[in-house]
């Protein structure tokens, strides 16, 4: 009796053993991550309206709150209200870091859905975590393109030097980006499962956190029951730390460590939710739909 031929994968068909196949298709490849980042970078740099959009709104925010800060300082005569007003520029620029970090992640993901390319990516050798990593890196690039010019303008117009915060700025940035990524990953999972019908979540979900993160006022002004909720959100620790640094010249490392601990938990939950939404979307076939 003629023996039945055993099926072979592509690597075996080309004369490669299992070790060769693993070497070519590792479980995580930075080459694929870099390739995805290059794809998004070429798309961004080839479109000046995209670049302008990254700079326009943060600049408007900075100028508006900067003049409000100047007005409060002039009217209060250097009192407690003036000292509180001095935190407005720092608050609005850190808020833009949080919001733009999340939005930069989500927009890159949405562009794949707009171009109907998402299903192609997910059936390619690209791993889900490589996809997520490329979106995280691209969110930092988009944030840098938008925020670096704004920080320079803040120095020229109002004498506020965000870079002068030094190590504290690095701690603020790391915690805000982790929160932005966690929210962006969760929203991307919703988009995978529910299609562009959930698109508005990418633009609006961060504003649900705005009252709780106490961007422009201390946590103490909230009702007691709402303070408990506010302290469960990592950015709250960052903005409290920013006010302590600007008003009291004290860096609250304890707040940064608490924010980091909560961020790690939220980031892990966001990854699990993304993978769960991806699995569910594959089961129900929503990946190929991609519409409303």
Image (cartoon, rainbow, N blue to C red):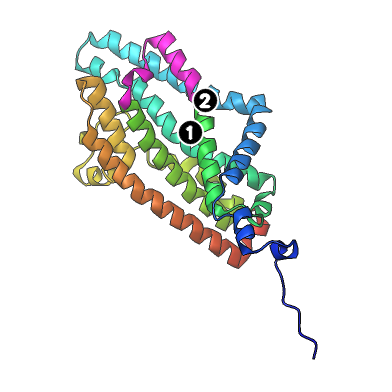
Task: Quickly name the residue at label 2.
Answer: 146
In the rendering, at what x and y percent does residue 188 appear?
A: 53, 49
Q: Is residue 43 left or right of residue 53?
A: right
Which disc, if any, is residue 174? none
Q: Quadrant of the image for the N terminus?
A: bottom right
Q: Name the image quarter holding residue 176.
A: top left
Q: Is residue 253 a member of the stretch shown in magenta?
A: no
Instruction: Assign a secondary structure to mark 2.
Output: helix
Does residue 212 appear anywhere in the picture? no
Q: Residues within 10 Å of mark 1 (few under 14, many from 20)?
A: many
Q: Look at 52% across and 59% down and name the residue there.
A: 277
Range covered by the magenta-colored residues: 146-167
Secondary structure that dominates the magenta span? helix
Q: Residue at x 80, y 87 (%)?
A: 2
Q: Are marks 2 and 1 in contact (CB under 8 Å)?
A: yes
* Residue matched to label 1: 100
């Amino acid at each position: 009796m003629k023996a039945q031929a055993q099926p072979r994968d592509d690597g075996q068909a080309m004369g490669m053993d299992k070790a060769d196949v693993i070497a070519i298709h590792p479980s995580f490849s930075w080459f694929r991550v870099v390739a995805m980042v290059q794809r998004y970078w070429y798309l961004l740099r080839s479109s000046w309206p995209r670049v302008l959009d990254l700079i326009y709104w943060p600049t408007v925010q900075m100028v508006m709150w900067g003049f409000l800060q100047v007005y409060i300082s002039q009217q209060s005569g250097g009192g407690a209200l003036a000292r509180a007003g001095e935190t407005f520029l720092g608050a609005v620029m850190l808020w833009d870091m949080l919001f733009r970090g999340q939005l930069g992640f989500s927009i890159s993901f949405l562009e794949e859905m707009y171009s109907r390319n998402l299903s192609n990516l997910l059936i390619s050798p690209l791993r889900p975590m490589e996809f997520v990593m490329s979106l995280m890196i691209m969110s930092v690039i988009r944030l840098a393109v938008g925020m670096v010019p704004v920080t320079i303008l803040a120095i020229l117009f109002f004498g506020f030097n965000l870079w002068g915060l030094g190590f504290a700025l690095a701690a603020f940035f790391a915690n805000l980006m982790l929160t932005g990524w966690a929210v962006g990953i969760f929203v991307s999972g919703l988009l995978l499962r529910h299609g562009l019908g959930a698109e508005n979540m990418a633009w609006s979900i961060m504003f649900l956190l705005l009252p709780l993160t106490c961007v422009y006022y201390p946590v103490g002004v909230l009702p007691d029951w709402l303070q408990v909720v506010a302290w469960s959100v990592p950015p709250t620790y960052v903005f409290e730390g920013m006010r302590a640094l600007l008003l009291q010249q004290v860096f609250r490392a304890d707040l940064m460590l608490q924010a980091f601990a909560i961020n790690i938990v939220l980031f892990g939950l966001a990854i699990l939710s993304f993978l769960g939404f991806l699995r569910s979307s594959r089961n129900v076939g929503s990946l190929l739909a991609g519409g409303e």
